[in-house]
Image (cartoon, grey):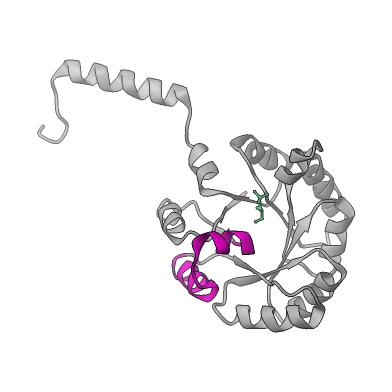
Amino acid sequence: MKFFADTADTDEIRDLAATGLLDGVTTNPSLVSQTGRDFFDVLRDICSVVDGPVSAEVTATEYDGMLVEGRKLAKVADNIVIKVPLTWDGLKACKTLSGEGTGVNVTLCFAPVQALLAAKAGAMFISPFVGRLDDIGHEGMQLIEDIRTIYDNYPDLSTEILVASIRHPGHVAEAARIGADVCTCPPAVIKKLVAHPLTDKGLAAFLADWQKTGQNICSA
Ligand code: G3P
């Protein structure tokens, strides 16, 4: 499973990229707004650090406007993927931009049949939002399971399931168990994945015992 960072914070992205674990980045208008920076500067900075897909979302809501914005954003770098909302116009824009060779991420997916439409429109990624479904008392991960089943029923569909709106490590573990292709996570969630109290406890015990030996590896 691939890991994308769901952020527009370039310092966080650099830190994550240094681990070699980062396969891509997703942004959205809310995340860009939190940076207070120019959208195009942010995208250029991210693409200078990350080779994998970097999602940049259009803000137009009609087909023509989505195409104008999508084509302009796609010029920033070869690895830019255009994010469009899962609307009728979004699906049409997905079809056109995909046909031009631009990768498209169809976002704001909350139902399995929406995911089927996006795949048929040529999406490179479908972004189902698990956390926002959990927030309203639905089972977000059931959506991932349903989309996985549907896509596996039709091997001609090449769209990757990009699990979005991830809130905690449990979402990542479940997504991997189901066989999702990508998880896009806030940096804080990616950093939590490494943590386990028994790792910390075990390391503290090893270091305490090592100190009793009075040895130092570097000065040996
Ligand atoms: O980038 C889309 C998605 O990951 C947003 O998540 O936390 O705003 O529901 P959230």
Which residues, given as a range, are shown in magenta?
27-49
Residue 28 visible here? no
Picture layout, residue 163 above or below residue 85: above
Left or right of 196 in this view: 102:
right
- The residue under the point 78% across, 73% down is 61
- The residue under the point 13% across, 20% down is 214
Residue 46 visible here? yes
In magenta segment, residue 166: no
- The residue under the point 17% across, 32% down is 217
User: Looking at this rendering, what residue extends furthest in the left direction?
Assistant: 219
In magenta segment, residue 37: yes
Q: Quadrant of residue 177?
A: top right
Left or right of 146 in this view: 208:
left
Residue 138 position, x and y percent, is: 82, 38
Picture layout, residue 75 above or below residue 150: below
- The prevailing secondary structure element of the residues shown in magenta is helix
Q: Quadrant of residue 145?
A: top right
Residue 151 position, x and y percent, is: 83, 54
Residue 7 position, x and y percent, is: 55, 57
Residue 96 position, x and y percent, is: 79, 80
Picture layout, residue 131 above or below residue 8: above
The quarter in which the C terminus is drawn is top left
Left or right of 207 in this view: 33:
right
